[in-house]
Amino acid sequence: MQLPPHKRENVLPLPVVLISTISKSGIRNAAPWGNITPILRPLDEIVLASWLRRDTLDNIRETGEFVVNVPPATMIEEVMICARNYPPEIDEFVEANLTPRPSTVVAPPGIEGSVAWMECQLVEEILREKYALVIGKVVHLEVNDRYATGKGDIDIESARPLSMVCSNDGIRYTRPVDAGRFAPYAEMFIRKP
């Protein structure tokens, strides 16, 4: 079956995060995001794509700070509440009954119960006709002790980080499952004789 190119999210699983920000007037915002990715391991930057009219983007532009919260699959309902199109003066932490978690470096709070928190500062915005790419530097990264292994990795089976695949009619929420194969990074490099 051939699909139109804009249906790429029908075949490409995306992470689901909640980005928390604060407006200049102090209103807390939490918005679900699927268009986000780290920029080249082991660098400390991430990039997210945004429509031009988003309260989250406005808040990032105004304050230069945001928190990327990685929700577990058990937070699906909170994510859907935050997906609603609230006016900018509505505190989405209150609407979704989210518990704020004080951040270490940035002003916006994280969201309690998340798998991990990435506190970020705006590095650059790349503006296009219909969207913006926001590059942020992760200035503080913390994994919830409940979901961390002794080495600082995420225990995928207990954390169950939320992801999604789109369809023609909506979103199917998913979560990663261990495929049963671990590959050390060294395995990817060809050794010279």
Image (cartoon, helix red, strand yellow):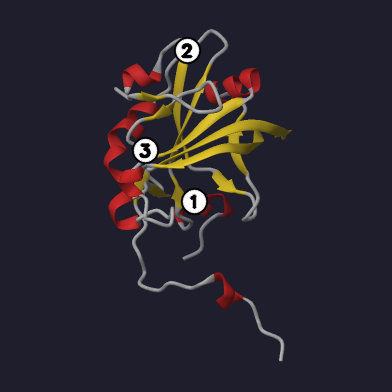
Q: Earlier in the sequence, mark 1 or mark 2?
A: 1
- Amino acid type at circle 3 is Ser
Marks 3 and 2, how far apart at CA: 21 Å
* Direction from residue 53 to residue 79 in the image, left or right: left
Residue at the extreme front? 150
Alpha-carbon neighbours of circle 2 within 10 Å: few (<14), some, or many (≥20)? some
Q: Residue at horizontal 54%, vertical 15%?
A: 23
| Residue 78 sits above or below residue 3 on the image | above
Is 25 situated above or below 116?
above
Secondary structure beneath label 2 = loop
Quarter holding the C terminus is: bottom right
Q: Which residue is mark 1?
A: 9
Identity of the residue drawn at 43% across and 55% down: 153
User: Residue visible at 39% across and 20% down?
Assistant: 92
Task: Judge the density around disc 3: few (<14), some (14-19), many (≥20) Cα neighbours within 10 Å.
Answer: many
Left or right placement of residue 162 versus residue 40 in this view: left
Q: Secondary structure at mark 3?
A: loop
Residue 51 in the image, given as x and y percentages of width and height: 59, 31
- Can the viewer see residue 129? no
Residue 93, position as x, y percentages in the image: 37, 21
Q: Is residue 46 above or below residue 3?
A: above
Identity, as a three-letter code, of the amino acid under mark 2:
Ile
Is residue 156 at all visible to an observer of this figure? Answer: yes
Q: Earlier in the sequence, mark 3 or mark 2?
A: 2
Quarter where residue 56 is shown: top right
Rendering coords of residue 165 (x, y %): 41, 51
Q: Which residue is mark 2?
A: 27
Q: Which residue is mark 3?
A: 114
